[in-house]
Image: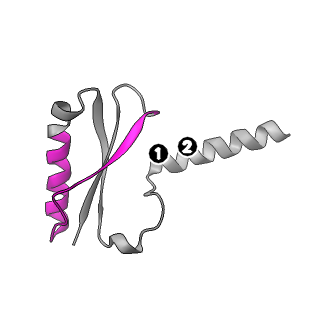
Amino acid sequence: MFETLVLVCVIGTTNICHTLEDLEGPYQTKQECISRAYEIAADLPSYMPNYQALKYKCIKDRETIEGKVRTQWHMKTDELLYSRSMDSKV
């Protein structure tokens, strides 16, 4: 079973983002999950007109995931913040 998550951000920025969780799932196959992510992205302007869908994630086993779902963007941001905090301490 797969659950769909979609990362949406305010148009023109990656600073104000939210993760949307699909309420219709879970889905039997990964392809169904991906199709649902694209449906959410297509419907997004009707519900959140100032946002755009940037990424999606299909999670197979939700019980094994703890904390935040990390994407490449989050990891790069964390590394940047860490390096800046280390620079200010020197």
Q: Is residue 63 above or below residue 50?
A: below
Q: Is residue 23 left or right of residue 66?
A: left
Q: What secondary structure is marked by label 2?
A: helix
Amino acid at pointer 1: Trp
Q: Is residue 46 left or right of residue 14?
A: left
**Residue pictured at 23% horizontal, 27% vertical:** 49
State which region is magenta: 15-42
Quadrant housing residue 45: top left
Q: Are marks 2 and 1 in contact (CB under 8 Å)?
A: yes
Q: Position of residue 39 (x, y in %)?
A: 14, 46
Amino acid at pointer 2: Thr
Q: Residues within 10 Å of mark 2 (few under 14, many from 20)?
A: few
| Residue highlighted by disc 1 | 73
Q: Is residue 38 magenta?
A: yes
Q: Position of residue 14 (x, y in %)?
A: 43, 34
| Residue highlighted by disc 2 | 77
Q: Is residue 81 above or below residue 64?
A: above
Q: Position of residue 50 (x, y in %)?
A: 28, 26
Quadrant housing residue 25: bottom left
Q: What secondary structure is marked by label 1?
A: helix
